[in-house]
Amino acid sequence: MIGVATGTYGDRDYWAVLVERAFRSVQAQTLHCEFQWVHGDTLHEARNEAANKLIKRGCDYLIFLDADDELDYEYAALTSQYAEISSSPFPVVYTATIGIVYGVRDLSPYMQSPKDILKENFITIGALHPAALFKEIGGFDDWPVLEDWAYWAKAFVHGATFVPCPSAVYEVHISSERLGRNKSAPDSVVSDTFTRIRALYGYQAMKAGRQ
């Protein structure tokens, strides 16, 4: 069973409207998914709590869905198929994305080319992965920015394999209200966090024989 987890913090009333739209995209999936929204004091705590609640409900796979984004209707079915045929114990199935800018949908999806996850992020937050991987790495950590990259870098250290699924599409809504923590934070904070993540998981990967 697939669980879709959404975590938010800050203005709950603002997020509630967007979560309703995200939830409708989960309801529209051709393969049934459980959904859990948690509004917490911090983003990482909210995401972790939502994921743990889904795991307690018996979910084998997790998808993290940002509250202001959506999943294409075949997203869960396509990504889970790729996960099931993967030989990796910890497949992370990443997908194409499409921008919806001020309500206008881009002409076609965009698929990131694979990169060295220890140097930069190329995985969307919505990549489907086993709940066992979430438990193995202990969920999200408390980073001021770039927490998605830190999560996938940590997953790689613990044996995750990144599996491309270009036929599935994660829908990213872009508006003046959506700056996100990475773009609204001071440059010095982003730069410092970038350096710390690279150093931490680069070192851990070397110790684990993953480099």
Image: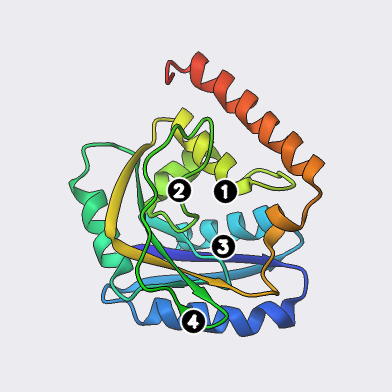
In the drawing, does residue 33 fall left or right of residue 56? left
Which residue appears at 53% of the width and 37% of the height?
Answer: 120
**How far apart in space, not on screen, are marks 4 and 2 (Cα)?**
23 Å
Residue 54 picture location, percent across and down: 47, 62
- The amino acid sitting under disc 3 is Ala
Which residue appears at 36% of the width and 63% of the height?
Answer: 2
**How far apart in space, not on screen, are marks 4 and 1 (Cα)?**
26 Å
**Numbered label attached to residue 104:** 4
- The amino acid sitting under disc 2 is Ile
- The amino acid sitting under disc 1 is Asp
Task: Check the image and report above or below for 28 versus 209.
Answer: below
In the drawing, does residue 210 fall left or right of residue 151? left
**How far apart in space, not on screen, are marks 1 and 2 (Cα)?**
8 Å
Badge 2 density bin: few <14, some 14–19, many ≥20, Cα 10 Å: many
Q: Mark 1 or 3, which is nearer the eye?
A: 1
> Disc 2 marks which residue?
123
> Disc 3 marks which residue?
50
